[in-house]
Image: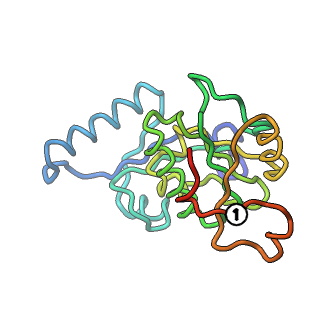
Amino acid sequence: ASGGDVKPAARSAPFLFVQEGDNTGRTASKKEMVQDIWKIAEEKGVEVAVVDKGVLNSLCGSRPHQGFVLRCGTMDLPNLPAIPRATASSPSLWLALDEVVDPQNLGALLRSAHFLGASGSAIGVVVCAKNSAPPSAVVSAASAGALEVASVSSTRNLPRLLGTAADEGWRVLGAAAGAPEGAAESGALFANLRDVEP
């Protein structure tokens, strides 16, 4: 069947492609990792196909794949209408990202936020839906998987979201390479982050 004949549900169903060949050259820990991946795929009901390396290279645009490529549907970030109050189950710190259009940079920021948050929920991330890199395989790879497990949301109007957060008692700090022209006259406070007390 051609791609047009495939039902939408089948087109986005997860499917794991595994590189054919023996595992004799792998270390014991890598062999164990391979077994874990097969086991997880089986537990999750993900179909698996064993293919040659050329197929994997084609599927991932010749990017590194370590012998595995997972085809899955797109990821949509949930809309964040307001930053929720900090609770045991919601982040107590938020990283708001605007105009991060490079997927490698977005992934690196997500990875750092997840690492610094330790538990994965201590730092939430919100991106502007209109002018940020969309969630993608490149973002996921650059984030070392943090995209899938961290608290990441989007908003259509980041200035409004941050203004509402400030009105609700959140402390909003911004960082920029330099203060915009005329900022001092606007009454906005600009300070060196080293001088800001927690």
Horizontally, residue 192 falls left or right of residue 49, namely: right
37 relative to 159, above or below? above
In which quarter of the view is residue 57 placed? Answer: bottom left
Q: Number of numbered discs present?
A: 1
Front-most of residues 136 and 189: 189
- Indicate the position of residue 112 as horizontal and vertical percent values: 47, 51
Q: Residue at x 52, y 37 (%)?
A: 149
Label 1 secondary element: loop
Front-most of residues 2 and 22: 22
- Indicate the position of residue 183 as horizontal and vertical percent values: 80, 70
The kind of residue on which mark 1 rests is Phe
134 relative to 44, above or below? below
Q: Which residue is mark 1?
A: 190
Instruction: Please identify the quadrant where the C terminus is shown.
Output: top right
Horizontally, residue 114 falls left or right of residue 131, namely: left
In which quarter of the view is residue 177 placed? Answer: bottom right
- Indicate the position of residue 73 as horizontal and vertical percent values: 62, 44
